[in-house]
Image (spheres, rainbow, N blue to C red):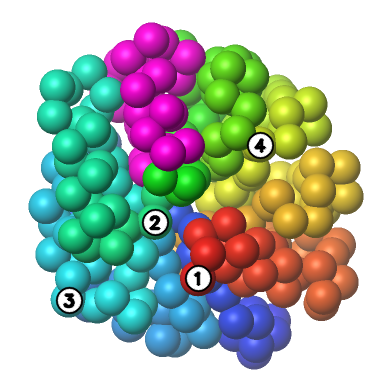
Amino acid sequence: MLDRIKSFKKIDAHSHIGVFGSWSNVSITAEELIADMDEYNVEKAVISTFPIKESIEAVDKYPDRLIGAAWVNPMEKDALDIIKDAVKNHGFKGIKLHPLSQAYLPNDECVFPIAELAGELDIPLMIHTGHPPFSLPWSVAQLADIYPDVKMVMIHMGHGNGMYVQSAIDMAKKYPNLYLETSGMPMHTKIKEAYEQVGADRIMWGLDAPFHHPTVEMQRTIVSGLNDSQLEDVFYNNAKKLLKL
């Protein structure tokens, strides 16, 4: 199984670097993440940090391996300037929102200027989903309805709750600008279901380092029931297309 896992070239659509204390008690440096990437045939990884400084430094240092997603708090007045600087001066290719950790709803008015900027820059808006009350798939879908021309990725595609996983798939079926990312989602069968029902180009693999071990996230995708060509889409092709790599 390990050899098969390593045989697929990958782009990690969602990870972090840094120290995460409190309940999670995990950490990873940019160099440690890249070492894992080398071991498991991961060509590039999308990273985000809050505050953004650490990810800017990492992307500037390793531009061929790390892709930046500008994590901002939309309630802070400098959020738009942070995004513009990250994209223009550091080559960031996405925007990251974490409504749960910063206590706002994805469809709150404070998010509207962020979504509008994502549309102007033509980059995806990547939104943590799966936990009440601030990051449920229905709220992300409402934002997708308001901004149909903005590509939005539901990070974790509902996360650990089966009802939220199903709702993420259902919402993505309804709104063609919604994409799904797999990290932390426990149901291997839902990866194949999303591929077949949402769209072959709208589901992508992620690691969510340092919270998960690479082999755990990779094996779930490997055993989902997809054939090799379909696995190549999930592991590599879809993120490459979305991020214009």
Q: Which residue is mark 4?
A: 177
- Residue 203, image x, y percentages: 68, 52
Q: Which residue is mark 1?
A: 245
Indicate which label's residue lies in the foreground, 4 or 3.
Answer: 4
Q: Which mark is residue 204?
A: none
**Residue displayed at 14% across by 22% down:** 77
**Residue 101 falls within the magenta-colored stretch:** yes
66 over 195 or under it: above or below: below
Task: Say whether disc 2 or disc 1 marks the residue closer to the N-terminus.
Answer: 2
Residue 226, x across and y down, in percent: 84, 65
Task: State which quarter of the image contains the N terminus.
Answer: bottom right
Residue topped by disc 2: 93
Magenta residues?
95-120
What kind of residue is marked 4? Asn
Q: Residue 241: percent from the left, percent from the top?
A: 61, 63
- The residues tagged by marks 1 and 4 sit, at their Cα atoms, a distance apart of 19 Å
Q: Residue at x 65, y 88 (%)?
A: 7
Assign a secondary structure to mark 3: helix
Tag nearer the camera, 3 or 1: 1
Amino acid type, residue under disc 1 in the picture: Leu
Q: CA distance from mark 3 to mark 1?
A: 18 Å
179 on left or right of 191: left
Q: CA distance from mark 2 to mark 1?
A: 9 Å
- The secondary element bearing badge 1 is classed as loop
Q: Is residue 171 left or right of residue 96?
A: right
Q: Which amino acid does the dot numbered 2 rest on?
A: Lys
